[in-house]
Image: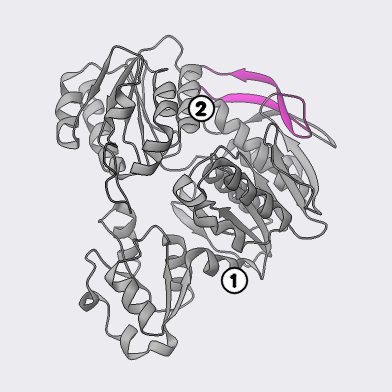
Amino acid sequence: MSALARYYNHAGCKVAGYDRTVSKLTEELEKEGISIHYEDDLSLIPKEFFDQKDKTLVIYTPAVPKEMRELVYFSQNGYNLVKRSKALGVIASGKVCLAVAGTHGKTTTSTLLAHIMTSSGAGCTAFLGGISKNYNNNLLLSNSRYLVAEADEFDRSFLQLFPDTAVITSTDADHLDIYENPDHFREAFTTFASQIKNNGFLVLKEGVNIDITGTSAKIYRYSFDKVSHFYASEIVIGGDGIITFTLNYPQGRIEGCTLGIPGWVNVENAIAASAVALLNGVSPIKLKEALATFRGVERRFDIKVNTPKCSYIDDYAHHPQEIKAAISSMRNIFPGRRLTGIFQPHLFTRTRDFAAEFAESLSALDELILLDIYPARELPIEGVTSKIIFDKVRIDNKIQVTKDELMPLLESREIDALISFGAGDIDRFVKPITDLLNRKLGL
């Protein structure tokens, strides 16, 4: 939503909007001249949007409750009202669309792909689901014919895109409040694959099992380290967690590749992004240079503190498989260290549907600090609290706390390696935690 706001603002439109809470991102948008309010109150909307109804486009995300008063007003009073995904689809239709879909990894993969296209000189316009640390933005603007889009499966949003090249990183079931069951979830990805344009490309992770008989795209598979069309070999992990590898692709090998951020999961995402870039004409030399200069995405395996005495990583992970992969990457980077995780579950429905899977993934920690559920758009569900995860976690060192209790708890603890997970408002704690740990380290 914020990238769309920036896009239209840059195009010279008057842009205003609502968000539930103030954040670093909304503050930046306000500095850019976008009017934002934080109460569901029609009187807070600038007057010109009522005076110039015929010139007003209202874009909304399905994450907003249907009963929101502002949304109801625009719906009942004949405004041009479209979902976020439709607006993005219209913009993408005029470009060579490179779309990245999947339950996990799509933000890092799409951001890295945008960086490769930009750094190589091919250029791109990009709508990203996170803030690129290379560009300090989630929107890249260019006169290039290429557009990189993060293709979000929530509410079947990605079915508004008809890409020239698409990546599918994973199809682990999620959003079952929308899809009802895993079969319907995978069917949406099957439809997405069928929408790739004739003579296009589908880059599919090894192990992803969807029906691809309906796509006319040429299909390539990728993997972290298993032999495939695109995969890594000669993998070496440095003392700082940075990985050097050889990238194997159908036309040859690119030796001595280094990704600018640590974690085997990120290298896997880099293989996918590299596949799309190579298929769209980026040279191996330019690709290798871009991989080395990638600085990552805020809240995606984002290293905030890294010393031999104490390390802290923040991650957006809010699905059991994402948590499992992030913990695995931390174990890989920080072998032998005591790993503490702070997790804030996101949504009552996701907690209800995946409580056992969350507990299984979190049991790979040495210590768990569990927060209450962040509800987002949802109303409470009877009997569904973070305790249904907590009770199933198998480790002894676990504790449930409120957000108010979190910082005092961390103040009293000795932290070795720490990771915070979640898609809710846990991001508000990242700076206080970073500051606390730096103070304890005397930095």
Nearer to us in this view, 241 or 314: 314
Which residue is rendered at x = 56% and y = 41% of the image? 182
Res. 239 visible in picture: yes
Q: Could you classify mark 2 by the number of other residues whose Cα lies within 10 Å: few (under 14), some (14-19), or many (20 or more)?
A: some
> Which callout, 2 or 1, points at the residue further toward the start of the chain?
1
Closer to the camera in the image, 440 or 89 = 89
Which residue range is magenta in the image?
226-248
Q: Few, some or many C-alpha atoms within 10 Å of disc 1 (few <14, some 14-19, many ≥20)?
A: few
Vertical position of residue 133 compared to residue 418: above or below: below
The residue that disc 1 covers is 90
Task: Name above or below for residue 146 compared with residue 169.
Answer: below
Q: Secondary structure at mark 1?
A: helix
Residue drawn at point x = 64 percent, y = 48 percent: 187
Q: Which mark is residue 325?
A: 2
Image coordinates for residue 185, horizontal then vertical, percent: 57, 46
**The C terminus is located in which quarter?**
top left
Q: Secondary structure at mark 2?
A: helix
